[in-house]
Image: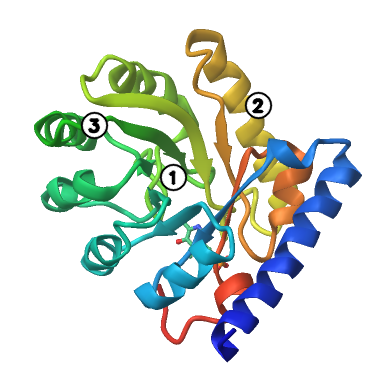
Amino acid sequence: MTDRKDELASNLAKVERRIADACAAAGRGREEVTLIVVTKTYPASDVRMLSELGVRHVAENRDQDAAPKAAACADLPLTWHFVGQLQTNKVRSVAGYADFVQSVDRSKLVTALSKEAERAGRELGCLLQVALDAGESGRGERGGVAPDGIEELADLVAGAPGLRLGGLMTVAPLTGEYAGREQAAFERLMDLSTDLRRSHPAATMVSAGMSADLEQAVAAGATHVRVGSAVLGVRPRLG
Ligand SMILES: *Cc1c(COP(=O)(O)O)cnc(C)c1O
């Protein structure tokens, strides 16, 4: 193996162990939690190595980087997740390679995603990004819909051709009542998921937890964790 592949393999093993330990501590089966490796800012060659090492889910947050990477890795058996704030003018591109968009947070985006999914003849899984720190505007600093906007947006996704409602996603808030209380934030997301599943039973995905707080997410009941730096290294630039 190359040095880089060794490094990725070793990091992946550490993350795998953390997830397994967190599952065991929570009395959950390891198969209840899916690892999504966030490959943003890292090259397609890393994505290829991760695929060879058994990774099946990857995530990106900027279409400009993700589109060429997905194209370069089109031969790999990977599921692509889009996890960044999404402008409607990027939706056509994203709908061409993403299997899931985890950052759905407004009706205009739903309309655009539906139109482009249909055009591409693809079905897009959609997760509603929930802002647990949403202010008066009803939106979070880094995107996301406020909890009281979930139901309306969920109904919209569920009724939109080309889209499938997958569940909910959040990023632990840096401000507001949940700042520094990751597990409480993820438990709140779990409660919101329970509410959502009353009207949308198939929307079972709960995406929460990153490199620093995956244990808290698994303890709260997350079905998907999104891990970047713990696998690939600390990113050279903000992303
Ligand atoms: C970058 C990113 C992650 C991964 O963060 P790490 O701290 O590198 O694990 C997870 N989710 C989203 C939405 C991200 O943008």
Please tell me the numbered disc located at residue 191: 2
**What residue is shown at x 34% (from left), y 39% (from top)?**
104
Mark 3 lies within 8 Å of ligand 1 (Cβ measured): no
User: In the rendered image, which quarter contains the N terminus?
Assistant: bottom right
Percent x, y of residue 86: 26, 51
Residues at circles 3 and 2 in contact by the CB criterion of under 8 Å: no
Callout 2 secondary element: helix
The residue identified by callout 1 is 135
Question: Compared with residue 193, is residue 3 higher up or lower down, i.e. above or below?
Answer: below
Query: For numbered disc 1, what is the local secondary structure?
Result: loop
At label 1, which amino acid type do we have?
Gly
Among the 4 quarters of the image, the one containing residue 46: bottom left
Q: CA distance from mark 2 to mark 1?
A: 20 Å
* Residue 237 badge: none
Q: Are marks 2 and 1 in contact (CB under 8 Å)?
A: no
Mark 3 crowdedness (10 Å alpha carbons): few <14, some 14-19, many ≥20: many
The residue positioned 38% from the left and 57% from the top of the image is 76
Q: What amino acid type is highlighted by mark number 2?
A: Asp
One can see residue 177 in this view = yes
Q: Is residue 234 above or below residue 228?
A: below
Image height check: is 155 above or below 4? above
Q: Please tell me which of labels 3 and 2 falls first in the chain.
A: 3
- Seen at 79% across and 60% down, the residue is 18
Q: Which residue is mark 3?
A: 110
- From the viewer's perspective, is the residue at label 2 or at label 1 nearer? 2
Of callouts 1 and 3, the N-terminal one: 3
Q: Residue at x 49, y 9 (%)?
A: 199
- The amino acid pointed to by label 3 is Val
Q: Is residue 154 above or below residue 85?
A: above
In this figure, which colouring scheme has been used for the structure?
rainbow
Of residues 171 and 79, the one nearer the viewer is 79
Where is residue 65? Give x, y as percent: 27, 69
